[in-house]
Image (spheres, helix red, strand yellow):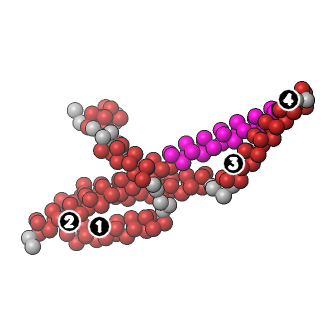
Amino acid sequence: MENREYLEKLRTQIREAYGRVVYTYTTHLYFMNNLKDKLKCIKYFQILLSAISTGGFLATIIINEIALSWISGLVSVALLIVNLYFKDFNLSEDIKRHQVASDRLWIMREEYISLLTDFDVLSIAQITAKREELQVNVAEIYSTSPKTDKKSYKQAQLALKNEEEQFFKSEEIDRLLPEHLRKD
């Protein structure tokens, strides 16, 4: 096989690996944001049930109404059920684990971009050595990262394909850079 043909196959493999890392990175970000939303809803629901329960109890003392006692008691039971159900879930810890995974994948994403940028000035041996190093690092990250779900993957897919998330147009980059570093 000719070197040029092999280099193109190598470039294709590295580009595909880069794409998988970007998808996984973005999926972890969406999964983490979904967990944050879920945690916020649970906390608000717990606060609401606590407020209703406490308000019902206080109203029962003031007005001495049996119906309020029952409502307050039922809401207290509902709050107990919610608290018992979620006592073994540690959404805050899950959020943190996904944040760590996405941070580590971000570094891999940047290393793949650097390899693709340097591709034309590196030897085949240097490229394959860096590729293998990246494969080992990514495999280690995948093996220690928490799993995501189909919903988060679909959100990442939509964002990457349709909204070009994670990418910038040249004009956008120019607006972010100081004037003396802009292209035109």
Proximity of marks 2 and 3: CB atoms separated by less than 8 Å: no
Residue 85 in view here = yes
User: Quick one: label 1, few (<14), some, or many (20+) residues within 10 Å?
Assistant: many
Pick out the residue farthest to the front. Answer: 67
Q: Along the line of sight, which residue is nearer the eye, 131 or 66?
A: 66
Report the magenta stretch's main SS.
helix
Circle 2 is placed at which residue position?
10
Q: Which of marks 4 and 1 is in front?
A: 4
Whichever of labels 2 and 3 marks the residue nearer the N terminus, that label is: 2
Label 4, label 1: how many angstroms apart (C-alpha)? 68 Å
Q: At 25% across and 70% down in the image, what residue appears? A: 128
Is 47 part of what is drawn in magenta? yes
Say which quarter of the image contains residue 5.
bottom left
User: Is 142 left, or right, of 163 in this rendering?
Assistant: right
Q: Which mark is residue 82?
A: 3
Label 1, label 3: how many angstroms apart (C-alpha)? 48 Å
Magenta range is 33-59
Q: Which mark is residue 131?
A: 1
